[in-house]
Image (cartoon, grey):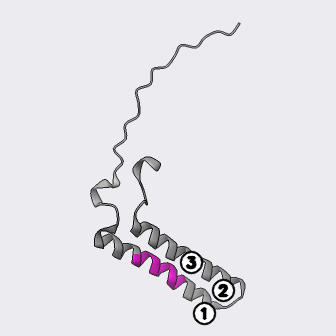
């Protein structure tokens, strides 16, 4: 994925950061057995996705046509096996 610049945009970083915070909130409240706090954390996770989509629509995400990776494998010629002596 390093060659495709997947997720290297402000929209992706912001959406994932908000979703991660929501995940941590939901996990903490799950351990404390507080269902209301858990669901509040899940709402924050969903909010991260919404914020990411809004930022992408504002032009802070990756352009739509750049999702396909234009990568060709280098030409490799197999070497003959050599006998070890």
Could you say which disc has been placed on residue 36 in the image?
1
Q: Is residue 41 left or right of residue 67?
A: right
What residue is pinned by disc 3?
A: 21
- Classify 10 Å Cα crowding around label 3: few (below 14), some (14-19), many (20 and above): some
Q: Are marks 3 and 1 in contact (CB under 8 Å)?
A: no
In the rendered structure, which disc, 2 or 3, sits on the residue that comes first in sequence?
Answer: 3
Q: Which residues are magenta?
A: 42-51
- Classify 10 Å Cα crowding around label 2: few (below 14), some (14-19), many (20 and above): some
In the rendered structure, which disc, 3 or 1, sits on the residue that comes first in sequence?
Answer: 3
Q: Are marks 1 and 2 in contact (CB under 8 Å)?
A: yes
Between marks 3 and 1 in the image, the one whose residue lies nearer the viewer: 3
Q: Nearer the viewer, residue 79 or 14?
A: 14
Answer with the quarter of the image where residue 72 lies.
Answer: top left
Which residue occupies 51% across, 72% down? 17
Helix, strand or loop status at disc 1 = helix
Q: Is residue 19 magenta?
A: no
Q: How many marks?
A: 3
Task: State the separation of the CA atoms marked 2 and 3.
Answer: 12 Å
Q: Nearer the viewer, residue 13 or 73?
A: 13
Which residue occupies 51% across, 79% down? 45
Between marks 2 and 3 in the image, the one whose residue lies nearer the viewer: 3
What residue is pinned by disc 2?
A: 29
Task: State the separation of the CA atoms marked 1 and 2.
Answer: 8 Å
């Amino acid at each position: 994925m390093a060659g495709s610049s997947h997720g290297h945009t402000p929209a992706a970083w912001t959406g994932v950061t908000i979703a991660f915070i929501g995940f941590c909130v939901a996990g903490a409240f799950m351990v404390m057995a507080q269902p209301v706090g858990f669901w509040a954390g899940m709402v924050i996770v969903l909010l991260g996705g919404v914020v990411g989509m809004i930022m992408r629509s504002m032009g802070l995400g990756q352009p739509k046509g750049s999702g396909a990776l234009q990568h060709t494998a280098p030409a490799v010629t197999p070497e003959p096996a050599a006998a070890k002596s």
